[in-house]
Image (spheres, helix red, strand yellow):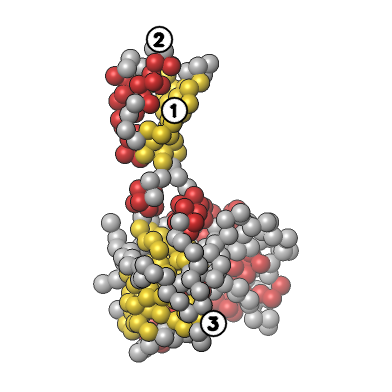
Amino acid sequence: MPAIELDGVEKHFGDVTALRGIDLSVERGDVFGFLGPNGAGKSTTIDIMLNYSHASAGSVRVLGTDVADDPVAVRRRIGVLPEGFEPFETMTGRQHVQFAIESKGVDDYPEEIIERVGLEGAEDRPASGYSKGMAQRLALGMALVGEPDLLVLDEPSTGLDPHGVRRMREIVREEADRGATVFFSSHILEQVEAVCNRVGILRYGELIAVDSLEHLRGTVGAESELTVELAGPASVTAVADAVRSLEGVSQVAEHDRERTLVVGCTTGAKLAVLDEIRASGGEIGDFSTGETSLEELFVSYTDSAGAKPGPGQRRPEGRARADASRDADETSDSGTESTPDPQPSTEVSR
């Protein structure tokens, strides 16, 4: 049974349609990355999943339960790290974690959670004095209370320094290893790529793609870059000419001095390239490959998805069907908050 099921979900605000027939299935144990440019409807989708907002049409089931029928039962089994978390002014970090434990009726030890997220030594300080990164660690700790079956992490790396980002990724992997499902929403694409086995891309209220990164690369014809260092006496130019004739090869750059070829090709053509190099007398000393990044895939999908529909209008191609079956802004999280770094050029926040 899937951890998350959205069936024909729509959301209307007056004449504006925010979500357009969203069909989504996220399997248990998945680490699912949820992406979308500004105004795509990502925030609205999460709010409906958590029953903070109600769908205008369609149904939502989380962990096998209709969220509209029994939202309390659903919330007991999930952990949520919300975007823009702010601690209570009068409570310490330990008291925040204890509050989460009591709210869920579990017997977790606050000290273990505090240590896990890296807040030891600061747990008895007023959380209102925490830096942004420390507050984010606290929110993650509260989300982990009770070993939830589903973690919803909304911009989880906000304010974290590189050490905090690395620990957050480790925790996500640990939670997935114990069988939890993780719904990971972030505008920092490299973080999604580092931890997620499936991703979904939302654009203008429609789910335009859901799949593994490997399959998404194949769908858009994304290329690999294969760098090959040649050994032996074979002519670099002769080998390059042989490789250029292969199907799936778009370009070949030769570097005689370094005896290196840089080949742009489809993922499926990589083995054929290596075989052709050997067949043409080349001896392979070493080789490396590079794949299309998630950022490049995101730009490809969102740039090719067509013009934005007018207010209240559907796109002509209709509902996107997406089945997600199985098959860190970085600022200091030290004692004082620092100025955030500029955002990446590809902005896919809410």
Question: Relative to 13, is 146 above or below?
Answer: above
Circle 1 Cα neighbour tier, 10 Å, few/some/many (<14 / 14–19 / ≥20)? some
Relative image position of residue 168 (x, y in whole percent): 52, 60
Q: Secondary structure at mark 3?
A: helix
Question: What amino acid is labelled 3 in the image?
Answer: Phe
Q: Is residue 297 above or below residue 267?
A: below
Query: Whole-percent x and y of residue 120?
Result: 60, 65
The Cα atoms of the two marked residues, 3 and 1, are separated by: 61 Å
Q: Residues within 10 Å of mark 3 (few under 14, many from 20)?
A: some
Q: Write down the quadrant of residue 129 in the picture.
A: bottom right
Foreground: disc 3 or disc 2: 2
Front residue (pair 170, 16): 16
Name the residue furthest bottom.
69
Q: Which residue is mark 1?
A: 252
176 or 94, nearer to the observer: 176
Under mark 1, the amino acid is Val
Q: Is residue 132 left or right of residue 44?
A: right
Q: Residue at x 42, y 57 (%)?
A: 196
Label pair 2/1, CB-CB below 8 angstroms: no
The residue furthest top is 233
Q: Residue 326, percent across and down?
A: 29, 60
Badge 2: few (under 14), some or many (20 or more) residues near its Cα, within 10 Å?
few
Mark earlier in primary sequence (2, 1): 2
Q: Which quarter of the rendered picture does the N terminus lie within?
A: bottom left
Q: Which residue is mark 3?
A: 99
Residue 184: in sight, yes or no? Answer: no
Discs 3/1, front: 1
Q: Of residues 257 and 191, which is closer to you in this image?
A: 257
Q: Which residue is mark 2?
A: 233
- What type is the residue that disc 2 sits on? Pro
